Image: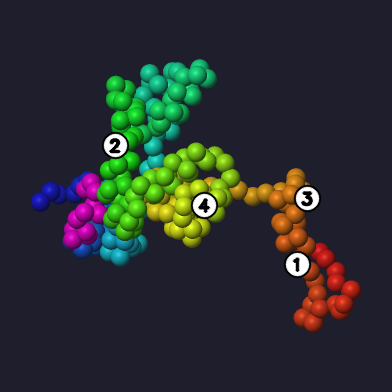
């Protein structure tokens, strides 16, 4: 029994602690920062925390290192284009950067293997993990490009709804981040922008009963 402040790692594996934490917090609502929880499996973590500690917590999402958080020896090399490219390939996970002697390929292959066997199986009962790993590889090859889930699903041998579901699984533990973009239809009026333009023009001031055949007005 330790007195606060207390840090509990991987709290999703000990959800039975949360009701007692709630009692302690409610006894001293004026004391912030009594407990710090960390966890790597978002579904299980947030399910337990939101059910028990709603309104009593602040949630912070921690991603891999920012360039300015890298060790000094690595930051000093980022002005060199080739060394910057090598850093991007190596990645920004803390373990790989604070221990430069680690073999990147071995570390990532082990990371993916344990992620598939632990996190993915806990989040969703996926029968074909090899196909799911192929899905991850296909997404990695498209990083930074427009995402077409139908195309990815076809290349992987799964349906578009399955590809969408699998993408959600990857987003939950922050392995993938999906960025929404907005297109200017005037930049491509006869191609991809055509559908956007027609969607915009479909909004017309026809009133409740319309304007009549041949009398429609666009706005």
**Quadrant assignment, res 218:** bottom right
Q: How many marks?
A: 4
Q: Which residue is mark 4?
A: 154
Measured from the top left, where is residue 144 in percent x and y?
54, 39
Q: Residues within 10 Å of mark 1 (few under 14, many from 20)?
A: few
Contact (CB < 8 A) between labels 4 and 2? no
Q: Which mark is residue 110?
A: 2
Q: Which mark is residue 190?
A: 3
- Marks 4 and 2, how far apart in space? 27 Å
User: Which numbered disc, 1 or 4, marks the residue that appears first in the sequence?
Assistant: 4
Q: Residue at x 27, y 48 (%)?
A: 117
User: Which numbered disc, 2 or 1, marks the residue that appears first in the sequence?
Assistant: 2
Q: Residues within 10 Å of mark 2 (few under 14, many from 20)?
A: few
User: Which numbered disc, 3 or 2, marks the residue that appears first in the sequence?
Assistant: 2
User: Which numbered disc, 1 or 3, marks the residue that appears first in the sequence?
Assistant: 3
- First to last magenta residue range: 8-18
Kindly state the secondary structure of the residue where label 1 is placed.
loop
Measured from the top left, where is residue 199 in percent x and y?
72, 62
User: Which numbered disc, 4 or 2, marks the residue that appears first in the sequence?
Assistant: 2
Q: Which mark is residue 203?
A: 1
- Marks 3 and 4, how far apart in space? 27 Å
**Quadrant assignment, res 215:** bottom right
Q: Nearer the viewer, mark 2 or mark 1?
A: 2
């Amino acid at each position: 029994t330790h007195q606060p402040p207390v840090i509990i790692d991987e709290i999703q594996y000990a959800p039975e602690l949360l009701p007692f934490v709630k009692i302690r917090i409610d006894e001293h609502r004026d004391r912030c920062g009594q407990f710090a929880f960390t966890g790597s499996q978002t579904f299980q973590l947030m399910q337990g925390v939101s059910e028990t500690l709603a309104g009593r917590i602040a949630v912070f999402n921690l991603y891999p290192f920012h360039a300015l958080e890298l060790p000094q020896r690595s930051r000093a090399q980022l002005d060199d284009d080739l060394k910057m490219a090598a850093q991007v390939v190596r990645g920004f996970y803390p373990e790989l950067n604070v221990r430069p002697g680690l073999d990147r390929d071995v570390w990532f292959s082990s990371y993916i293997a344990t992620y598939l066997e632990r996190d993915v199986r806990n989040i969703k009962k996926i029968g074909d993990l090899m196909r799911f790993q192929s899905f991850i590889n296909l997404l990695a090859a498209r990083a930074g490009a427009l995402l077409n889930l139908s195309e990815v699903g076809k290349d992987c041998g799964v349906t578009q709804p399955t590809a969408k579901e699998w993408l959600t699984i990857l987003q939950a533990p922050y392995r993938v981040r999906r960025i929404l973009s907005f297109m200017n239809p005037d930049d491509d009026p006869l191609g991809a922008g055509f559908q956007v333009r027609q969607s915009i023009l479909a909004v017309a001031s026809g009133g409740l009963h319309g304007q009549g055949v041949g009398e429609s007005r666009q706005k």
